Amino acid sequence: MQIRVPSGMSRRHFLNHALSSAAAVPALEFLMHLEANAATVRKNQKACILLWLGGGPPSIDMWDLKPGSKNGGEFKPIRTTGGYEICELLPKTAKIANNLSIVRSMSTREADHGRGRYYLHTAYIPNPTVVHPSFGSVVSHELGPKRPWLEIPAFVSIGGTSEGPGFLGMANAPFVVDAGGKIRNAEMDKMDGDRFHNRLSMLEVVETGFINSKRGEAPQAHADVYKKAVNLMTSKQMSAFRLQDEKPEVCAAYGNNNFGRGLLMARRLVEIGVPFVEVTMDGWDLHQQVFNGLKTRLLPNLDQGFSSLVSDLSARGMLEHTVVICMGEFGRTPNINANVGRDHWAQSWSVVMGGGGLKGGRVIGGTDKDGVAVEGKSYLPGDLWATVASALGIPLATVHTSKLGRPMKIANGGTPIQELTT
Amino acid sequence: MSNLCVFHDSRVAPACESVRRFLAAPFAGVFATIALLLLTSSAPGSDKPGKPTEKPPARSSKADKVLRSGETHRSADPVVALINQQIRQAWQENQIVASPVADDEEWLRRVSLDLHGHIPFWKEIDRFRKDKNPNKRAALVDKMLDDPAFVRNWTTLWTNLTIGRQTPRQVSRAGIQKFFRESFAQNRPWNEIVYDLVSAEGRSDENGAVNFLLAQMSTRDEMVLATAKTTRLFMGVQLQCAQCHNHPFDPWKQAQFWELNSFLRQTRPIEHRTLNRATGQRMTDYTELVRTDFSGPVYYEKRSGEMQVAYPIFFDKKIDPGSSVDRRKELARLMTSGDRPYIAQAMINRTWGHFFGYGFSNPVDDIGARHPPSHPELLERLSQEFVKNHFDVKQLIRWICTSDAYQLTSRTTIKNAKDDPAMGHAPLFSRVYPKPMEAEQLYDSLLIATDVEHTVHADWTARQKQRDEWLQQFIFAFGTDENDEASTFNGTIPQALLMMNGQLIEKATGGESGSFLHKVLDSESTEIQKIQRLYLASLSRHPHGRELGAAEHLIELYPDKLPGYQDLFWALLNSNEFIINH
């Protein structure tokens, strides 16, 4: 791994100063520990990568095709190594499908983008009296403290903003970056270590005064976020964002587009121990020309990125520790509208997941012949996240407390999907 | 931190629980009056002013007296008296005691950010503090409302609300800015402004009001987004869920969504483009919003798959569905007429929320059964007064800014700690809730802090454009039919990095000849006065003793003067106190 030492100051020099100051950079011992224990420790750390298809993907054209139905659409199903069929425009994914399972029985009730995005990320429907955390924030809250050597945020969101940390506080907010991997304003090159230290010391004086002025939690949250930002700036782990360090053929395999780059970055972040990474691909709000949109851009990019990610994780021995889950805020109407599009549909749709010890090659539940209703048991976002929690080793008995003092069960008290866990 | 600024389309904001539960305690006013007496004798806070050259500011004894005596209000305006009475009553019913009145510095900084969108210029702070006029706060509100900075700030707020921070295709940002600038400068009645935005026809560059609807028409969605946005923004009613089904909690029916939608269907954009010979690309010159001869009902599908028709009906008021009737004009008329139109309540709630950090009902644009208002009677009566006063926006702001509650400090005390809407409680306005600065406020505040505003004859249009460009780095568009966007200027790490290492702060703390710091260092004043000036310029107050000591120590670390002052100014601009509007 290439280590970039900022010019103008060395990290150690900075740390020697900063350690004595309030800018609590993690102690040097952790750094040594990190360097000594090599990659194997971190590779075995549990993690989750969420592939977020923003706008609501038409899962009826992707994972649960209805050939022969009036709702069937243009595409044909193909066989996969998972034993089930998916869309013909996902041939590469079909080859690694034995690692993945499809939940064809999602039934959520929010078909508005904002509300659906919130529901699928938090497992709770929006409620005016409490802001729930994105599940990435939950993982950050549960697993972040167990990885003290991790100097970059435990929840990274690439190419999209995810949902916020809610009552878990700003320290668990998603760190939002773009797929270019350049973290704006984080370069230490220009900065003189002594001066930076002097500035932070003065800052602490002002901040502490304001924190003590009894104005709620925001002043302290501000100080906490600054600590994290300083941490980040001075960390060697920032190299995880540098895709230039990857071989060109690896980059090419993931795809020369932002989604591909985001997924490759996600793999690098998981490698250094980040427990939750979300990668967003927007453009799925296909009210018009759904088949054209899928054919020309969306499905080829998804196919390439998704399949490369799974193959790469598998080749590196990381797939058994890393859950991958691919979904959006809802599915799309089985009915094809007058603009050859599909509208919002939350009643019956599909999510794909695998890795992290979850069973691959399975289909959970199903929809009727026209795709308009789930037949048999259906699942909620809380069930998905409970499944992820169990794969990550986060106890389902975990209860958080909202600011009002209300107990909040992890994943909204959902139940892991049995066919995936056993 | 959730999106506290209500001049955003708040997606999910913490808000009030059933106010009934909270307002349960039936304690008599006598008890609360005693409590009020107790409060005003309690210490204001722990900060002790250090060794400033001037006497520390005295807290406004005037407003203190108001609270102590328990009288309703000194203001002659009966509406302000109404606000004071209603707010106070809820304090009593909930057995809380309001925070003390904010000192002049705290109040001035807040009212400047709220009204002008930036912190006060450092010279104004002591001037205001020393002003002996007992009505100086009200006088300042009047003065600020007449300042072009108010017009500019309200234009920014309403431009962002109507078209977003990212300018959609076919939309002229300059066009709608001009519309709002002129409207707020003339203090046009709010119902007239809404009427124009809903009914406008013509060119995006000439009749700026058309840009509101154009911004909702980037996809051909049969004006679904325009329907949802119009009701949500101007009427405080969220109908978007009713597009597909009857609302489970609110009384809205799917039919109502489509009936309202049918008012907007005589609308079509025509893009006028010319070929740019240099680039070979066709560029949009302007877009025209025109009326079509659409007539009859619209069709929509029920969940059962059954097709339905919807005629233009505005809550029981039917209009002629023929093509000769201009439906948008009819909708605009119906929305803005009557003695209790939705637009009054929606504007009150949003504006109140802008100043206090929370509206009566939160999120501010979803007033209804799901989010019952904290002070239903006050909201209702304020709406009536707003209508009676011809939708006078400046008057509404005057009412709010001169109310007792707005004079209070943002600090909590033991006696009102439970008044915390961030925890999910209904707001009681026993203090002013802190709110994070918006990106625009930061940008403009830095110009004020570094004297740019007062030294350069800034070209506003050019500056506005520069600011808009700078803002783009924070904006994420979700790319959906709801046209929603999110900002990373939200108190997370990217914002901290921007503040610590970004160009804007680098420029503000630069010390080249002619710069702000250079001038401060060049001035004939003592070390302490220079430090004070940096404090006034950034935090709008004098330093406390410990801070002064730390600053002096910092400056002594360097052989040259400049680096120490740069570091100090950097620390002040990066602080929580600077970025949190309190």
Image (spheres, coloured by chain):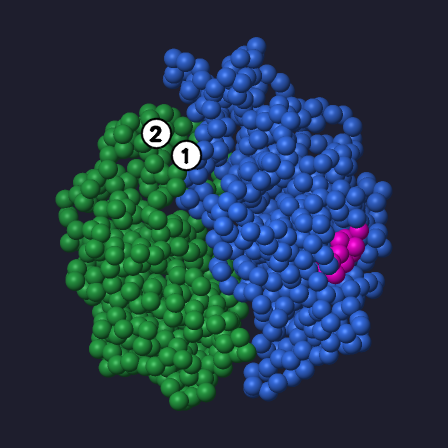
Asked whether residue A140 appears in the rendered view, the answer is: no
- Chain identifier, colour blue: B
Q: Residue furthest top?
A: B524
Q: Is residue B208 above or below residue B118?
A: below
The magenta-colored residue range is B189-200
- Residue type (three-letter) at the residue carrying disc 2: Lys
Q: Are marks 1 and 2 in contact (CB under 8 Å)?
A: yes
Label 2: state its secondary structure: loop
Q: Residue furthest front?
A: B277
Tally of numbered discs: 2
Q: Is residue B112 magenta?
A: no
Relative to B319, is B505 on the left or the right?
Answer: left
Which chain hosts label 1? Answer: B
* Position in image of residue A66 (x %, y %): 39, 85
Q: Which mark is residue B174?
A: none
Relative to A11, is B439 on the left or the right?
Answer: right
Residue at horizontal 30%, vertical 51%? A145
Residue at horizontal 52%, vertical 36%? B577
Relative to B417, is A123 on the left or the right?
Answer: left
- Chain identifier, colour green: A
Asked whether residue B266 appears in the rendered view, the answer is: yes
Q: Is residue A7 above or below residue B198?
A: above
Magenta span main SS: helix
Residue at horizontal 39%, vertical 89%? A68
Write down the residue under mark 1: B501
Which chain hosts label 2? Answer: A
- Residue type (three-letter) at the residue carrying disc 1: Asn
Write down the residue under mark 2: A190
* Position in image of residue A195 (x %, y %): 36, 25
